[in-house]
Amino acid sequence: MGERLVWQRPAQLLQPDALEAALNSPQGCWPRSLSGSRASAFSRSAWRAHVARVQREPLKGGVSGAQLERLLVEVELEGPTERRKEALSLIFKRMRPDESWLMRSSSDLFCREVQVWRHGLLADAPRALCVPVLAAAYDEAAHEGALLLDDLTRWLGRLEDCFAVISPNQWKQYLDHLARLHAHYWQDARLKEPRFALASVEQTLLMLAPATIQAQRAAGDAHPYLPVSQAGWEAFFTYGPAAALGKIQRVFDAPAAFLAAAAAVPATLLHGDAWPPNMGMLPDRHGGSRTILIDWALTTAGPASFDPFWLLFAWRKVDTRRALLYYRQRLSQHLARRGLRLGAAEWQLLLDLGVARTVLTCGESMGQEVLFASNAAHRAKATQALAWWADWAASAIERQGWAQ
């Protein structure tokens, strides 16, 4: 990926010299979109960009608390035989732990999505993936970080995609490319290095737990998502099957056995928040497409199954068990190219870890779908889905003895 561009303070990324360095670097993904009527792309090897003017627009962020801006950058492109003016669109993302409830709840004290790029962990990610970071900045004293990214918004998924029919080509590409990521970093020694600030399995398991949400509200955190999450958990434990809920609650109360099992399988690099709004299909110059992955704030070293389960829970109209079988086949094939084997017992443990973790982190979302259903039919369907996931998780918990 070439030399990484890293500055010491977030504001420096907004300066013309930093923008020019980023625009002329080999970082980011091809193509970079151009705004305006000439929606096309330029080759960084053939053209050099000179920044003329920058217009900043605030963007609505997600639930994490990060601050987002779109930068409309007017540039003069200097090519081998001509010069022309264009407008490029970039994204500036700034983050501070004291401004983000999600960073606090996942114990992200050092802006981990900055650190994994800053220190090069993603530098050799599989070519099938597009991580659209151009440059980063991190203030060691203030613990404040920022990223400058290609604006690939038009290729990213949307919340509505969770409820849409997904073509087999799309869900197979996403799962195959996640499998490539996981096989590539399988038992990678770098995952233990503290400089990357990766989240632990325990931190991501409990970041949305009922006790965590209650503690943050009790401490005075007024983020509007917290009461929604708490209401979701209350609905989960109200409408879910009682026998299954008892097992799930016991893992919340005493997660040591689950965490020990998670530590017993090979660790790999997880995106941690692989769902439609953080993913997209980016056309390449060869008629195929790469998978965009943005927002690595929850990136973790842990069991490979966590990512596909997270994605498949978000996709309501994809057959979860069929898709997991496909993911297993692709992961096994990518591991085999490295001389590694995924055995049946190991896969069963990965399945059990994945479904239990999904319910322990997404149960509040399942409860919200019941609570905020628009009519009785939708509420009945959401309640049925909640029971399906809870029963599956409870079976895994019982099979593995995690609720003793």
Image (cartoon, grey):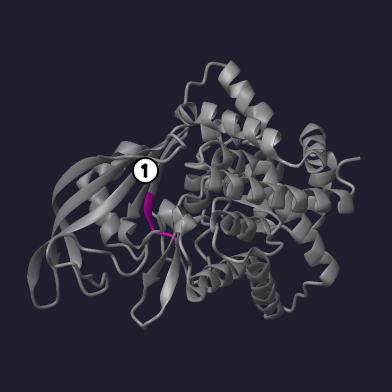
Could you tell whether 373 is left or right of 84 in the image?
right
Whether residue 204 is visible, yes or no, is: no
Residue 383 found in image quarter: top right
Quick check: 97 above or below 340?
A: above
Q: Position of residue 211 (x, y in %)?
A: 68, 27
Q: Main secondary structure of the magenta part?
A: strand
Residue 9 found in image quarter: top left
Could you tell whether 68 is left or right of 251 in the image?
left
Q: Residue at x 33, y 56 (%)?
A: 153
In the rendered image, which residue does mark 1 sit on? 93
The amino acid beneath tag 1 is: Lys
Q: Nearer the viewer, residue 297 or 224?
A: 224
Could you tell whether 317 is left or right of 190 in the image?
left
Q: Residue at x 81, y 53 (%)?
A: 396
Q: Nearer the viewer, residue 41 or 208?
A: 208
Q: Quadrant of the C terminus?
A: top right
Quick check: 58 above or below 382?
A: above
Q: Secondary structure at mark 1?
A: strand
Could you tell whether 67 is left or right of 173 in the image?
left
Q: Residue at x 41, y 37 (%)?
A: 66
Q: Residues within 10 Å of mark 1 (few under 14, many from 20)?
A: many
User: Where does the magenta region start and end?
Assistant: 131-135
161 drawn magenta? no
Q: Position of residue 306 (x, y in %)?
A: 66, 55
Whether residue 58 is visible, yes or no, is: yes
Q: Nearer the viewer, residue 207 or 234?
A: 234
Q: Residue at x 59, y 59 (%)?
A: 312
Residue closest to the far bottom: 286
